[in-house]
Amino acid sequence: MTATFPVEERYGLSQQMRRAAVSIPSNLAEGAGRNGTKEYLHFIGMSRGSLAELETQMQLAVMLGLTTPDHPAFDLADSAGKLLTCLHKQWSFA
């Protein structure tokens, strides 16, 4: 999505969105490398927080006219949210 943003957004919203997107799987990887379910659940929660941050930034991009609400990234974010919710539920009962 950010590839189509104007150059002046390269170090603004675009960079924030890319960082949030990278944080989602990075937190999962870090949590998986820790000791125990409780810590992993904590990092799953951090991933969910990063996704919420990204979704907010995506909505801001729409409001700023940088993208449209039907951009495929919205569907990807929704799918990621569902996967994170399932993962959290699975590990909550482990």
Image: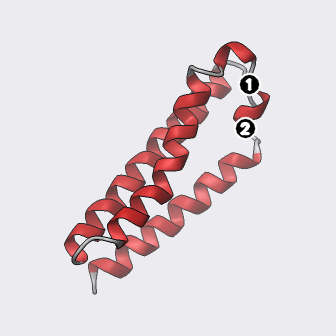
Q: Residue at x 75, y 48 (%)?
A: 72
Q: Is residue 91 above or below residue 69?
A: below
Q: Which mark is drawn over residue 1?
A: 2
x then y, percent, for residue 17: 56, 35
Outermost residue, bottom side: 94
Residue type highlighted by circle 1? Phe
Residue type highlighted by circle 2? Met
Q: Is residue 91 above or below residue 47?
A: below
Q: Residue at x 61, y 62 (%)?
A: 79
Disc 2 residue crowd, few under 14, some 14–19, many 20+, Cα 10 Å: some
- Marks counted in the figure total 2
Q: Residue at x 37, y 81 (%)?
A: 90
The quadrant in which residue 11 appears is top right
Which residue corresponds to mark 1? 5
Q: Is residue 90 above or below residue 8?
A: below
Q: Quadrant of the C terminus?
A: bottom left
- Left or right, residue 51 beside residue 49: right
x then y, percent, for residue 76: 66, 55
Pointer 2 with pointer 1, Cβ within 8 A? yes
x then y, percent, for residue 21: 54, 46
